Amino acid sequence: MLKIDDLRLNYTRSSLEIEEVYKNPIQQLEAWFSEAIAQNIIEPNAMVLSTVDRFHKPHSRVVLAKAISNDGIQFFTNYTSHKAQDLDSNQNACVTFFYPDLERQIRIEGTVGKISREESEKYFHSRPKSSQIGAHVSDQSKVIHSREILEQKQALLESQFEGKVIPLPDFWGGYLLKPTYFEFWQGRTSRLHDRIAYTLSENGWKIERLSP
Ligand SMILES: Cc1cc2nc3c(=O)[nH]c(=O)nc-3n(C[C@H](O)[C@H](O)[C@H](O)COP(=O)(O)O)c2cc1C
């Protein structure tokens, strides 16, 4: 058996005080995100997205955040994928960013809806052509019998779309997670970590410290 029970780190890099966080959690997210970029964290926009299916079973996977604004957090995917099916039946979802090098975690909960086709089109056409073709090729989350099937479809579409604008597939586009809850976690010594939570209420964001 692999011995992992003695793997542990003591977190010493930073701290988080309720007095020093932004009143708007999106600003706090942007601040931490900017620090992650400045520290050359690999894929700082990678977040674990958790959804719940119609049988109340949770499912998690990584997706890339593609925009952050006061409206929420955008990501893009296939609208027939498992995650999309989960979101069709249950709009509640959460995302988690983990920056081990910064000893930080950010948890965001909210509801998810599709963005407009125009917005999806704008993002789709900003992607490299190979990624646009990739979106057409992949019947995401379906079983396929070999990688060759994908590569053959890719080659076919590459020649079909040669010199042409690649259209946004009907089955592909963006979602917006509208946050109702944020938690910023900063690792501290002796497991007495800092946790600052924001809960959306009628009077705006309520900010509280949580016990680690
Ligand atoms: C670093 C990383 C980034 C990813 N980004 C995306 C993404 O932006 N959109 C997406 O649909 N899948 C992305 N994936 C793949 C998903 O994790 C997942 O395999 C896929 O979306 C199918 O998930 P589902 O079957 O739950 O729908 C990414 C995976 C990794 C590891």
Image (cartoon, rainbow, N blue to C red):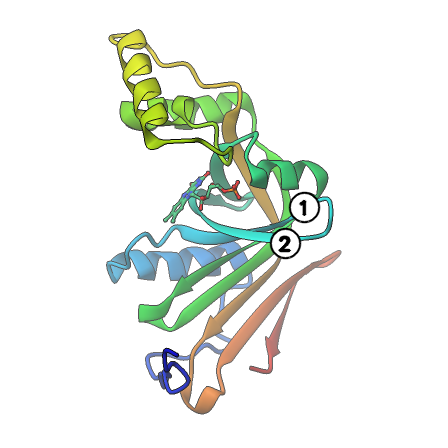
Report which quarter residue 13 is drawn in.
bottom left
Q: Residue at (34%, 56%) from the top-left corner?
A: 34
Marker disc for residue 204: none
Give, as a three-letter code, the residue at label 2: Pro
Neighbours of disc 2 within 10 Å: few (<14), some (14-19), many (20+): few
**Relative vertical location of residue 89 with respect to residue 30 in this rendering, above or below:** above
Q: Nearer the viewer, residue 206 or 78?
A: 78
Whole-percent x and y of residue 157?
Answer: 33, 14
Q: Nearer the viewer, residue 156 or 66?
A: 156
Q: How many marks?
A: 2
Give the quadrant of ligand 1.
top left
Q: Earlier in the sequence, mark 1 or mark 2?
A: 1
The answer to whether residue 162 is left or right of residue 138 is left
Q: Pointer 1: what residue?
A: 53
Neighbours of disc 1 within 10 Å: few (<14), some (14-19), many (20+): some
Mark 1 CB within 8 Å of ligand 1? no
Give, as a three-letter code, the residue at label 1: Asp
Report which quarter residue 176 is drawn in.
top right
Q: Residue at (36%, 14%) from the top-left corner?
A: 166
Q: Quick check: marks 1 and 2 in contact, CB under 8 Å?
A: yes
Whole-percent x and y of residue 150?
Answer: 35, 26
Q: Residue at (41%, 89%) from the top-left corner?
A: 189
Quarter of the rendering occupied by the N terminus: bottom left
Whole-percent x and y of residue 43?
Answer: 32, 52
**Relative vertical location of residue 40 with respect to residue 133 in this rendering, above or below:** below
Most extreme residue toward the bottom is: 190
Q: Residue at (47%, 36%) from the top-left corner?
A: 76
Question: Is residue 18 at least partly visible in the picture?
Answer: no
Real-space Cα separation, disc 1 to disc 2, in angstroms: 6 Å
